[in-house]
């Protein structure tokens, strides 16, 4: 399909959202580890897969099933997102997504641009819904998802423990068409 979109950030700089390339693998892993090290937003704290595995993943992606996107500012990959469509006939109408932006680049419109690219991909494929799980304490992410029309569909109660407190995982979805 080939996704590449340039857009202005709130601070005047330009950003690019595009398909991830094998050369982005090291930055992809470093960025997920940086967000993981913050300890409160995503489940994974240390990314277990190797650079070679991620390179292969980016190289061999089937865009009708999976999407790997990066966001770039000043030539540096500073965020990314992925979406994965159900692999079975029972869930092929639904995709799950993940998104993250390095801390110093948040609040500039990058997360929203990544999400909008995933939603456009889902519409192009004719998917019915896009879903995700988010920790109930993650107000920035919930704000982003609600702004784009995602709504809560359920909760896994006290699914995670963050800084010693049990926190619900909120399951949210955006419906692209009715079924
Ligand atoms: C969630 C995340 C991806 C948002 O990305 P971002 O680039 O900062 O978001 P944007 O600047 O595009 O903001 C888009 C919208 O999100 C919402 N939002 C962003 N930051 C917010 C905040 N701190 N509080 C409440 N809402 C917020 C707003 O609705 C905002 O729209 P507005 O600016 O018109 O009000 C980013 O905070 C992040 O990477 N967090 C760590 C990783 C993470 O939590 N990933 C999701 C796990 S489920």
Image: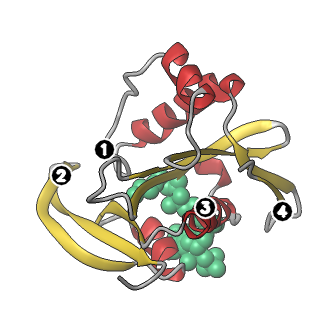
Comparing labels 4 and 2, the label whose residue is closer to the camera: 4
The spot of residue 11 in percent (x, y) is 82, 64
Name which residue lies at 67% across and 52% down.
Answer: 105
Judged left or right of residue 9, residue 44 is: left
User: Which mark's residue is nearer the viewer, 1 or 4?
Assistant: 4
Of the residues under marks 1 and 4, which one precedes in the sequence?
4
Q: Quadrant of residue 19?
A: top right
Depth check, front residue: 38 or 69: 69
**What numbered label is drawn on residue 7?**
4
Q: Name the element at disc 4.
A: strand
Marks 4 and 3 close (CB-CB < 8 Å): no
The location of residue 30, given as percent across then percent down, is 55, 28
For label 2, the crowd category at 10 Å Cα-Cα, with few meaning under 14, some 14 to 19 and many 20 or more, is some
The image quadrant where one finds ligand 1 is bottom right
Q: Which mark is residue 65?
A: none
Mark 4 vs mark 3, CA separation in Å: 18 Å
C-beta proximity under 8 Å, tags 1 and 4: no
Residue 43 — which label? Answer: 1
Question: Which residue sits at x=37%, y=22%?
Answer: 48
Mark 4 against mark 3, which lies toward the viewer? 3
The quarter of the displayed image where residue 136 is located: bottom left
Of the numbered discs 4 and 2, the one sitting upstream in the chain is 4
Asked if the beta carbon under badge 4 is closer than 8 A to the nearest atom of ligand 1, the reply is no
Q: Which residue is painted at 68% across and 64% down in the image?
A: 113
Residue under pointer 2? 160
Q: Residue at x 80, y 63 (%)?
A: 9
x and y percentages locating residue 97 in the rendered image:
44, 55
Would residue 12 be found to the left or right of residue 21 on screen?
right
């Amino acid at each position: 399909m080939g996704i590449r979109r340039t857009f202005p950030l709130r601070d005047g700089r330009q950003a690019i959202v595009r398909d991830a390339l094998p050369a982005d693998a090291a930055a992809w892993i470093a960025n997920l580890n940086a967000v993981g090290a913050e300890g409160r937003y995503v489940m994974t704290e240390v990314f277990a897969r190797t650079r070679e595995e991620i390179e292969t993943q980016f190289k061999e992606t089937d865009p009708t099933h999976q999407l790997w996107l990066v966001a770039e500012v000043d030539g540096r990959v500073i965020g990314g997102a992925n979406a994965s469509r159900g692999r079975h006939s029972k869930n092929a109408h639904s995709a799950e997504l993940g998104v993250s932006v390095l801390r110093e680049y948040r609040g500039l419109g990058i997360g929203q641009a990544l999400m909008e690219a995933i939603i456009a991909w889902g519409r192009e494929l004719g998917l019915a819904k896009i879903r995700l799980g988010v920790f109930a304490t993650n107000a920035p992410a919930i704000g982003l998802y609600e702004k784009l029309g995602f709504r809560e569909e359920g909760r896994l109660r006290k699914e995670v423990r963050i800084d010693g407190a049990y926190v619900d995982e909120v399951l949210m979805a955006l419906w692209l068409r009715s079924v």
